[in-house]
Amino acid sequence: RLAIIMWLSRLLFFLVFTIIIEAKETNWSIEKSLRPESINTTQQFMGLGGLFEHNSSIHSLSVNGRINTITSNGVVYSTLSDISITSFVTTCQNYWLTLPNGWAIAPDTAEVRNVLVQYPWSTDVLILASGVGYRTSKFPPAGIAFGDSQSKFTQSGNQYYCPWCNYQIMIMLTSSICGTGTYYSTSTSTCTTCSSGTYSLSGANYCTSCASGYSSPAGAGTCCAAGSYTTAGSTLCISCPAGSYAAVGFTTCSSCAAGTYSNSGASTCTACIPNTYSATSGSASCSSCPSGSTSKAGSTACCAAGYIAGYGSCTVCAAGSYAAAGDASCSQCLAGKFSLSGATSCLTCAAGLSSSAGAGICCAAGYYVSSSDASTCLACPVGSYAAVGATTCSSCPAGKYTAAAGSTSCTACENRLASPGGTGVCCPDGSYTSPSSSICLQCGINSYSVGAAVCSSCAAGSYATMTGSTACTGQVVTACPAGSGMLSDQLGCYLCAINTFNTGSSSQCKSCPTGSIALTVGSVSCVVSPCSVGSYTTTGTSAGCKLCPAGTYDTLFGSGSSCKSCTTGTFSAAIGSSSPCTSCSPGSFANTSAATSCAACPAGTYTASSGSSSCSGCAAGKASSSIGAVSSSTCSACPAGTYS
């Protein structure tokens, strides 16, 4: 019985002592939290296995009625219960508390562990983000991991629960670490820059996406509407200055292109209206065109009379058109008028000249304006003509022809067979033509023609051994028509060859005089050559004149449809040569016609004369190493032991 009484007495003493101690502790804690103070200390602590020194600022501030903090190296630390509890009912975190935005569970680092040992308020163990609890200075040795703290830390989303009074969760103010445009990442325990299209204020635990129609660059503290922008770390939106714009999604302002403008805060640029322009990018307004000039919408320049405005430049009115001051487009000149490029009006053609609509030149009779080049007059082709005042060429009717291009009228075929209209040829006796042909075809063997459209077969008992006959054997010809000559046996006629003619006054064809040509067989006359000496023509017009190529020549004022080729042993290196070819000099040769140079005689050969077409070889038993040798004296006897 005595033992029981003594045991109960000791138990009662222990309980009373514990209550007194606990009451003192509680009163001290409440008193500390109500009395703001700021103590800058340099303290020594035994923890983490040794003695260390740490400089910190310890504060007891009143926020929502209760907050205790420690600031170390610019970072603010506290406990979840100090931040979340708004009354002084208890100092224990023995119920669920929500982690406020701007705060994060302190990471388990050496820096944080060195701070927690200084925590001066009535907390024995502080739990870090790792879930491990460490002793504070109230529960030495400070800084040492304590017991089964893993089981005292419960989390549900953003809420935390600690059932023991001597355990609290250590947190830190992320705004003291992370600035505007960044957020605190609990996975890396670092501040991370917000990506473009999101933003954050200082101390945020996450970045917020921009609303529809807003945008932001990376690291922004706000989102801006179209027409404005912000910079990293800023919470202000700045309107784009006049002359620039920012569409939705733009993170900077861009200058308006030339031909457009904008007011301040624009989300797009506006094209300059007609008859205004902006010559440079970044324009805040468009300028009016000077008097007498015009422009299209979105122009960078204004255009004077004779030009029309494009979207970026002025286009000159082509020859054959014009634009008066203020005209929006070029107008075509009427027939009988013309203009050069850039004209402000059309001019009337001079007397004797004419033009078609849209012409850049007036043409003489026999010529017309080119459809591909309004400033060029082209000669009417053979078989057509253009009278004075005509704007186009007309084909010769059947029974008439033109002997040369650029004709102003057609000539009747007289007594010769007429080709179809527009062919430009009339066929003599002994030939015929067809509607699909523009040339005269000779009658075949054993056939003939005289003033007929077709060839007739020779009668029985007679024949014609040559093509182009005007009679069959046994029928004596007394006269041949113009453009042909009589055969020597007087049994038929032949067509005059190219560059020969017969007016019908002679029985034979004659060569054209110097300086004139006849480009078709059966010609009744020659025409003055349009080409100079050293050239030729295949069309009979100056437009068809071509210089004689090297290796050829012409001495008769372009009297043929081709130039004469140099014979073997001669050459001509010049283009358009008007003199006969030059003979190869001794020691050289030309073995082909139309040569442009002579080749030197190779070793073992020679030639002593000029105009050689080949070289002579050294005699048997002799040899020569000389190139271009002119004498057999260069050949020497083969030395003993050799032969040739």
Image (tube, rainbow, N blue to C red):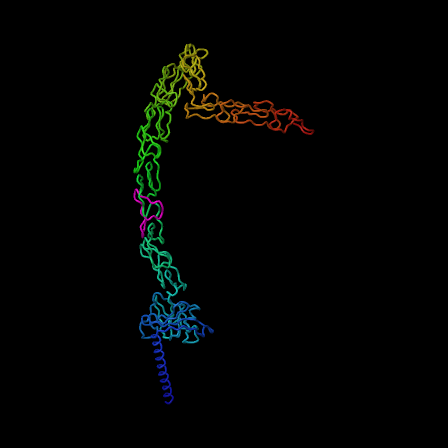
Please tell me which residue lies in front, 154 or 541: 541
Whole-percent x and y of residue 465? Answer: 44, 14
| The N terminus lies in quadrant | bottom left
Report if residue 274 lies within the magenta region.
yes
Q: Residue visible at 38% across and 18% down?
A: 426
Whole-percent x and y of residue 37? Answer: 36, 73
Please tell me which residue lies in front, 187 or 73: 73
**Displayed quadrant of residue 155:** bottom left
Please tell me which residue lies in front, 74 or 116: 74
Above or below: residue 146 compared with residue 324: below
**Displayed quadrant of residue 301:** top left
Whole-percent x and y of residue 54? Answer: 44, 71
| The C terminus lies in quadrant | top right
Above or below: residue 72 compared with residue 343: below
Q: Is residue 549 left or right of residue 253?
A: right
- Magenta highlight range: 262-284
Report if residue 432 lies within the magenta region.
no
Please tell me which residue lies in front, 479 or 211: 211
Q: Is residue 534 left or right of residue 394?
A: right
Q: Residue furthest front?
A: 291
